[in-house]
Image (cartoon, grey):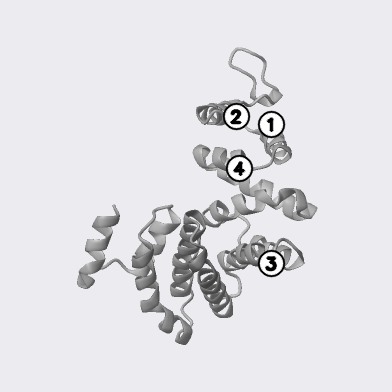
């Protein structure tokens, strides 16, 4: 996949647009850091000059993927610059379009990485929920980050975080939901399972099966084994 992508970029006449690339990244596809940096640099100057919200949003998505790649690889040398790039592109997007939920979420991510969890981080997350409470593509980025801090969130943000998870379940994205559940603390896992008690029985059992496929055991009463009574 990476080789095919490199070859397609090498032929600049037939290169994918920034929007194409951002759409692929938002679906979880990944590409070589050097390629991403080269493409992002082509649009950096233009994004400063022109208030094109879509272009600035796409540039932010590329910088977010680069930050994620550096975190996963443990590339400390590149991390500081990547955090700065995300901050800059997020603020440029907000300056052009203040209601961009993904930009506020990006600032939240940078803040908890650089400054830790505190009032500033909470304010950024609050704005992300304010402007994009049910945008599923944003929720897929936001829910894992918010769930990690669930125990420290104010009640309103806890409710909205659970709503993110509920929407992901409602979209039948069970493998993704299970990964988020697995990464959450034990106390948060209990909250998520309790919140699913009003879901249809088949939804709960499908979730349980996906969880079991990852070696997780669901013992909550609402997720009883087939043949046993299931609450609700």
Read off the residue under disc 4.
Answer: 183
Q: Which residue sits at x=36%, y=58%?
A: 31
Within 10 angstroms of label 1, few (less than 14), some, or many (20 or more) residues? some
Q: Where is residue 212, by image quadrant? A: top right
Residue 47 in the image, given as x and y percentages of width and height: 45, 80
The earlier-in-sequence mark between 3 and 1 is 3
Mark yes or no: residue 232 visible: no
Mark 3 or mark 1, whichever is nearer to me:
3
Mark 2 or mark 3, whichever is nearer to me:
3
Residue 35 in the image, given as x and y percentages of width and height: 33, 66
The earlier-in-sequence mark between 4 and 2 is 4
Read off the residue under disc 2.
Answer: 204
Query: Is there CB contact under 8 Å for labels 1 and 2?
Result: yes
Q: CA distance from mark 2 to mark 3?
A: 38 Å
Read off the residue under disc 1.
Answer: 197
Q: CA distance from mark 4 to mark 2?
A: 19 Å
User: Which labelled disc corresponds to residue 19?
Assistant: none
Mark yes or no: residue 129 visible: yes
Q: Which residue sits at x=53%, y=26%?
A: 209
Read off the residue under disc 3.
Answer: 115
């Amino acid at each position: 996949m990476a080789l095919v992508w490199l070859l397609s970029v090498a032929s600049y006449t037939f290169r994918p647009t920034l929007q194409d690339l951002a759409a692929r990244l938002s679906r979880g596809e990944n590409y070589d850091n050097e390629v991403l940096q080269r493409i992002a640099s082509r649009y950096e100057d233009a994004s400063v000059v022109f208030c094109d919200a879509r272009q600035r949003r796409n540039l932010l998505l590329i910088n977010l993927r680069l930050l994620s790649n550096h975190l996963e690889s443990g590339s400390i040398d590149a991390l500081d610059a990547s955090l700065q790039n995300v901050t800059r592109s997020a603020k440029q997007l907000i300056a052009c379009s203040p209601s961009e939920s993904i930009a506020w979420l990006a600032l939240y991510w940078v803040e908890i990485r650089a400054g830790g969890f505190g009032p500033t981080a909470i304010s950024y997350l609050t704005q992300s929920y304010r402007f994009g409470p049910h945008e599923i593509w944003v929720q897929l980025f936001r829910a894992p980050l918010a769930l990690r801090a669930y125990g420290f969130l104010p009640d309103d943000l806890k409710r909205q975080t659970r709503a993110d998870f509920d929407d992901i379940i409602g979209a039948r994205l069970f493998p993704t939901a299970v990964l988020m559940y697995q990464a959450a603390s034990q106390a948060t896992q209990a909250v998520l399972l309790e919140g699913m008690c009003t879901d249809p029985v088949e939804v709960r059992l499908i979730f349980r099966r996906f969880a079991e496929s990852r070696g997780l055991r669901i013992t909550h009463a609402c997720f009883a084994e087939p043949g046993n009574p299931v609450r609700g």
